[in-house]
Image (cartoon, coloured by chain):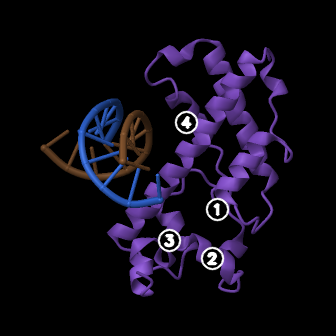
Chain colours: A purple, B brown, C blue
Amino acid sequence: MFFFTRYPSSNLLKAYFPDVQFNRCITSQMIKWFSNFREFYYIQMEKSARQAISDGVTNPKMLVILRDSELFRALNMHYNKGNDFEVPDCFLEVASLTLQEFFRAVSAGKDSDPSWKKPIYKIISKLDSDIPEIFKSPSYPQELLRNEDPTERGAAGQGFLGLS
DNA sequence: TCCAACCCTG
DNA sequence: CAGGGTTGGA
Protein backbone atom coordinates (compact mmCIF):
# COMPACT_ATOMS: atom_id res chain seq x y z
CA MET A 1 0.00 0.00 0.00
CA PHE A 2 2.94 2.29 0.67
CA PHE A 3 3.61 2.32 -3.06
CA PHE A 4 0.39 4.28 -3.46
CA THR A 5 0.12 6.14 -0.20
CA ARG A 6 2.87 7.51 1.99
CA TYR A 7 0.57 9.42 4.30
CA PRO A 8 -2.59 7.38 4.90
CA SER A 9 -5.13 8.76 7.34
CA SER A 10 -6.57 6.46 9.96
CA ASN A 11 -9.82 6.65 8.02
CA LEU A 12 -8.20 5.40 4.85
CA LEU A 13 -6.56 2.55 6.72
CA LYS A 14 -9.89 1.50 8.15
CA ALA A 15 -11.40 1.49 4.68
CA TYR A 16 -8.71 -0.81 3.33
CA PHE A 17 -8.53 -3.25 6.21
CA PRO A 18 -12.18 -4.20 6.71
CA ASP A 19 -11.15 -7.41 8.43
CA VAL A 20 -9.24 -5.60 11.13
CA GLN A 21 -11.00 -4.64 14.35
CA PHE A 22 -9.64 -1.15 14.83
CA ASN A 23 -9.09 0.21 18.29
CA ARG A 24 -6.82 2.97 19.51
CA CYS A 25 -3.87 0.58 19.74
CA ILE A 26 -4.14 -1.03 16.32
CA THR A 27 -4.70 2.32 14.66
CA SER A 28 -1.74 4.04 16.25
CA GLN A 29 0.37 1.00 15.49
CA MET A 30 -0.47 1.13 11.79
CA ILE A 31 0.11 4.87 11.69
CA LYS A 32 3.43 4.19 13.33
CA TRP A 33 4.25 1.63 10.68
CA PHE A 34 3.79 4.13 7.92
CA SER A 35 5.89 6.58 9.86
CA ASN A 36 8.64 3.98 9.94
CA PHE A 37 8.08 3.23 6.26
CA ARG A 38 8.51 6.90 5.43
CA GLU A 39 11.69 7.08 7.46
CA PHE A 40 13.28 4.26 5.52
CA TYR A 41 12.08 5.80 2.27
CA TYR A 42 13.44 9.28 2.97
CA ILE A 43 16.71 7.96 4.33
CA GLN A 44 17.29 6.07 1.07
CA MET A 45 16.39 9.16 -0.95
CA GLU A 46 18.74 11.42 0.96
CA LYS A 47 21.57 8.94 0.77
CA SER A 48 21.09 8.50 -2.96
CA ALA A 49 20.84 12.25 -3.55
CA ARG A 50 24.09 12.92 -1.72
CA GLN A 51 25.72 10.10 -3.64
CA ALA A 52 24.63 11.67 -6.92
CA ILE A 53 26.06 15.01 -5.84
CA SER A 54 29.39 13.51 -4.90
CA ASP A 55 29.32 11.68 -8.21
CA GLY A 56 29.23 15.01 -9.94
CA VAL A 57 25.64 15.03 -11.14
CA THR A 58 24.49 18.59 -11.81
CA ASN A 59 21.05 18.27 -13.34
CA PRO A 60 18.40 16.84 -11.01
CA LYS A 61 16.40 15.82 -14.05
CA MET A 62 19.01 13.13 -14.56
CA LEU A 63 17.87 11.49 -11.37
CA VAL A 64 15.13 9.13 -12.45
CA ILE A 65 14.37 5.93 -10.64
CA LEU A 66 13.74 3.01 -12.94
CA ARG A 67 12.88 -0.59 -12.18
CA ASP A 68 16.48 -1.61 -12.69
CA SER A 69 17.84 1.09 -10.40
CA GLU A 70 19.79 0.08 -7.34
CA LEU A 71 17.60 2.39 -5.31
CA PHE A 72 14.51 0.63 -6.60
CA ARG A 73 15.96 -2.69 -5.58
CA ALA A 74 16.44 -1.47 -2.04
CA LEU A 75 12.94 -0.06 -1.80
CA ASN A 76 11.32 -3.13 -3.32
CA MET A 77 13.29 -5.34 -0.97
CA HIS A 78 11.90 -3.40 1.94
CA TYR A 79 8.26 -2.96 0.96
CA ASN A 80 7.68 -5.84 -1.42
CA LYS A 81 10.15 -8.48 -0.38
CA GLY A 82 8.25 -11.38 -1.84
CA ASN A 83 7.47 -9.51 -5.07
CA ASP A 84 3.83 -10.13 -4.24
CA PHE A 85 2.71 -7.57 -6.77
CA GLU A 86 3.98 -5.17 -9.39
CA VAL A 87 5.10 -1.77 -8.19
CA PRO A 88 2.96 0.94 -9.85
CA ASP A 89 4.52 3.53 -12.12
CA CYS A 90 3.09 6.31 -9.98
CA PHE A 91 5.42 5.24 -7.20
CA LEU A 92 8.48 5.45 -9.42
CA GLU A 93 7.45 8.94 -10.42
CA VAL A 94 6.95 10.08 -6.84
CA ALA A 95 10.21 8.46 -5.81
CA SER A 96 12.09 10.15 -8.63
CA LEU A 97 10.60 13.48 -7.65
CA THR A 98 11.54 12.90 -4.03
CA LEU A 99 15.09 12.13 -5.03
CA GLN A 100 15.24 15.29 -7.11
CA GLU A 101 13.87 17.41 -4.27
CA PHE A 102 16.54 16.09 -1.93
CA PHE A 103 19.13 16.72 -4.59
CA ARG A 104 18.04 20.34 -5.00
CA ALA A 105 17.85 20.96 -1.28
CA VAL A 106 21.26 19.51 -0.49
CA SER A 107 22.81 21.21 -3.50
CA ALA A 108 21.49 24.54 -2.26
CA GLY A 109 22.91 23.85 1.18
CA LYS A 110 19.46 23.78 2.75
CA ASP A 111 20.56 20.87 4.91
CA SER A 112 22.21 23.25 7.32
CA ASP A 113 18.74 24.07 8.60
CA PRO A 114 17.62 21.57 11.28
CA SER A 115 14.19 21.26 9.69
CA TRP A 116 15.25 21.38 6.05
CA LYS A 117 13.39 18.17 5.22
CA LYS A 118 10.01 19.54 6.20
CA PRO A 119 9.39 21.37 2.90
CA ILE A 120 10.18 18.17 1.03
CA TYR A 121 7.81 16.14 3.20
CA LYS A 122 5.09 18.67 2.49
CA ILE A 123 5.56 18.33 -1.26
CA ILE A 124 5.61 14.54 -1.23
CA SER A 125 2.64 14.29 1.09
CA LYS A 126 0.50 15.84 -1.63
CA LEU A 127 1.44 13.16 -4.13
CA ASP A 128 -0.42 10.24 -2.64
CA SER A 129 -2.44 8.26 -5.19
CA ASP A 130 -5.73 6.48 -4.91
CA ILE A 131 -5.35 2.87 -3.95
CA PRO A 132 -6.85 0.32 -6.36
CA GLU A 133 -10.17 -1.00 -5.13
CA ILE A 134 -8.96 -4.58 -5.30
CA PHE A 135 -6.82 -3.93 -2.26
CA LYS A 136 -9.85 -4.00 -0.03
CA SER A 137 -11.65 -6.78 -1.83
CA PRO A 138 -12.29 -9.86 0.30
CA SER A 139 -11.23 -11.97 -2.66
CA TYR A 140 -7.83 -10.32 -2.78
CA PRO A 141 -5.01 -12.90 -2.53
CA GLN A 142 -4.96 -14.14 1.04
CA GLU A 143 -1.20 -14.19 1.11
CA LEU A 144 -1.02 -10.51 0.34
CA LEU A 145 -3.57 -9.47 2.91
CA ARG A 146 -1.87 -11.48 5.57
CA ASN A 147 1.39 -9.69 4.98
CA GLU A 148 -0.15 -6.34 5.82
CA ASP A 149 -2.48 -7.45 8.57
CA PRO A 150 -1.21 -6.25 11.96
CA THR A 151 -3.14 -8.97 13.75
CA GLU A 152 -1.18 -11.65 11.97
CA ARG A 153 2.32 -10.87 13.09
CA GLY A 154 4.38 -9.46 15.88
CA ALA A 155 4.60 -10.69 19.46
CA ALA A 156 0.84 -10.53 19.96
CA GLY A 157 0.14 -12.62 16.89
CA GLN A 158 2.73 -15.19 17.79
CA GLY A 159 1.37 -15.44 21.29
CA PHE A 160 -2.11 -15.96 19.95
CA LEU A 161 -0.88 -18.67 17.64
CA GLY A 162 0.96 -20.30 20.47
CA LEU A 163 4.31 -20.13 18.74
CA SER A 164 6.29 -18.91 21.73
C1' DT B 1 -1.53 22.26 27.60
C1' DC B 2 -2.42 18.38 23.99
C1' DC B 3 -1.71 15.46 20.49
C1' DA B 4 0.10 14.08 16.15
C1' DA B 5 4.44 13.80 13.68
C1' DC B 6 9.06 13.50 13.86
C1' DC B 7 13.70 12.10 15.52
C1' DC B 8 16.74 8.80 17.53
C1' DT B 9 17.76 4.42 19.24
C1' DG B 10 17.76 -0.71 19.98
C1' DC C 1 9.59 -2.28 13.32
C1' DA C 2 8.67 -0.73 18.47
C1' DG C 3 9.83 2.57 22.36
C1' DG C 4 10.44 6.71 24.17
C1' DG C 5 11.88 11.47 24.02
C1' DT C 6 11.24 15.89 21.30
C1' DT C 7 8.76 19.27 18.73
C1' DG C 8 5.59 22.51 16.77
C1' DG C 9 0.98 23.88 15.77
C1' DA C 10 -4.00 23.95 17.54
Crowding at dot 1, Cα within 10 Å, few <14 / some 14-19 / many 20+, comes out as: some
Q: Disc 3, disc 2: CB below 8 Å? A: no
Between A86 and A48, the one nearer to me in the picture:
A48
Q: Pointer 2: what residue?
A: A145
C-alpha span from label 3 to label 4? 23 Å
Query: Mark on residue A14?
Result: 3
In percent of width and height, residue A30 lies at 46, 63
Amino acid type, residue under disc 1 in the picture: Met
Mark 3 or mark 1: which is in front?
A: 1
C-alpha span from label 2 to label 4? 28 Å
Which badge, 1 or 2, comes first in the chain's sequence?
1
Marks 3 and 2 share the same chain: yes
Q: Quadrant of residue A23?
A: bottom left
In percent of width and height, residue A86 lies at 80, 62
Which badge, 2 or 4, comes first in the chain's sequence?
4
Crowding at dot 2, Cα within 10 Å, few <14 / some 14-19 / many 20+, comes out as: some
Amino acid type, residue under disc 2 in the picture: Leu
Residue at the image point whose x is 70% and y is 61% from the top:
A81
Marks 3 and 4 share the same chain: yes
C-alpha span from label 3 to label 2? 14 Å
Marks 4 and 1 share the same chain: yes
Q: Disc 3, disc 4: CB below 8 Å? A: no
Amino acid type, residue under disc 4 in the picture: Tyr
Query: Mark on residue A1?
Result: 1
Which badge, 3 or 2, comes first in the chain's sequence?
3
Q: Secondary structure at mark 2?
A: helix
Between A63 and B4, the one nearer to me in the picture:
A63
Between A51 and A141, the one nearer to me in the picture:
A51
C-alpha span from label 4 to label 1? 18 Å
Q: Chain of mark 4?
A: A
Which badge, 3 or 1, comes first in the chain's sequence?
1
Q: Where does the N terminus of chain A fall, quadrant-wise?
A: bottom right
